[in-house]
Amino acid sequence: MRSKFFKVLIIGLLLAFTGKTYAGTGPADYNKTIRDFIDSHMNSNYKKLDAVMGEDATFKIPRGEVVLIQSKAKLVAQMQQIANVTQNCDAKYEVLAKSDALVIARVDFNYENTIQHNFLILEKNIDKEWKITQVCKVFDDKEVTEPQKVIARN
């Protein structure tokens, strides 16, 4: 009787863990990837950024009439140098288009004087994991109506 109970318990646990493992491959799982991207930016979490980005991911940032292109490796290395710095901004995102294999989303980081728009391209890889393959960053300056006070924080 006791051995049957333990067998059933072990089989139940295995089924529960197996179900949990494959539950994350559904179409809405891209939301977790986007939220992890936001968290990596907000908290300078280079490990989380590394996990959500595809191996050949690129970041495109316009500077005047030129577009700078950064690799995932370079950006992760830069973020590692400033690990644990918390951004002073709010974040929100919107999914602009989606299919079973591709998602386009916009993530806005709202700072006091500017909004950083990040247009993300997410693709489902061969392992059925959502990975960000491209980020295009665009900045919109906000109109300042009164001088801003600078406060130093430790």
Image: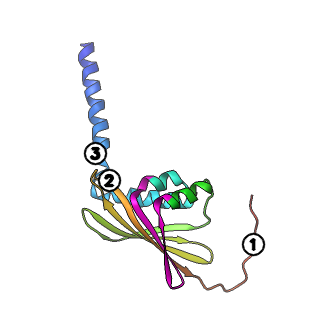
User: What separation in Å lies between label 2 and label 3 (alpha carbons)?
Assistant: 10 Å
Q: Which mark is residue 129?
A: 2
Q: Nearer the viewer, mark 2 or mark 3?
A: 2
Q: What amino acid is found at the position of numbered circle 3 in the picture?
A: Tyr
Which mark is first along the chain, 3 or 1?
3
Which mark is first along the chain, 1 or 2?
2
Residue at coordinates 75% horizontally, 68% vertically from top-left? 151
Q: Which residue is mark 3?
A: 22
Badge 1 crowding class, 10 Å Cα cut-off, few under 14, some 14 to 19, many 20 or more, is: few
User: What separation in Å lies between label 2 and label 1 (alpha carbons)?
Assistant: 43 Å
Q: What amino acid is found at the position of numbered circle 2 in the picture?
A: Glu
The image quarter in which residue 94 lies: bottom left
**The residue tagged with tag 2: helix, strand or loop?**
loop
Q: Which residue is mark 1?
A: 150
Magenta span: predominant SS is: strand
Q: What amino acid is found at the position of numbered circle 1 in the picture?
A: Val
Residue at coordinates 54% horizontally, 76% vertically from top-left? 115
Give the magenta range.
Answer: 51-73
Q: Position of residue 58 (x, y in %)?
A: 43, 66
**The residue tagged with tag 1: helix, strand or loop?**
loop
Please tell me whether residue 125 is drawn above or below residue 67 in the rendered image: above
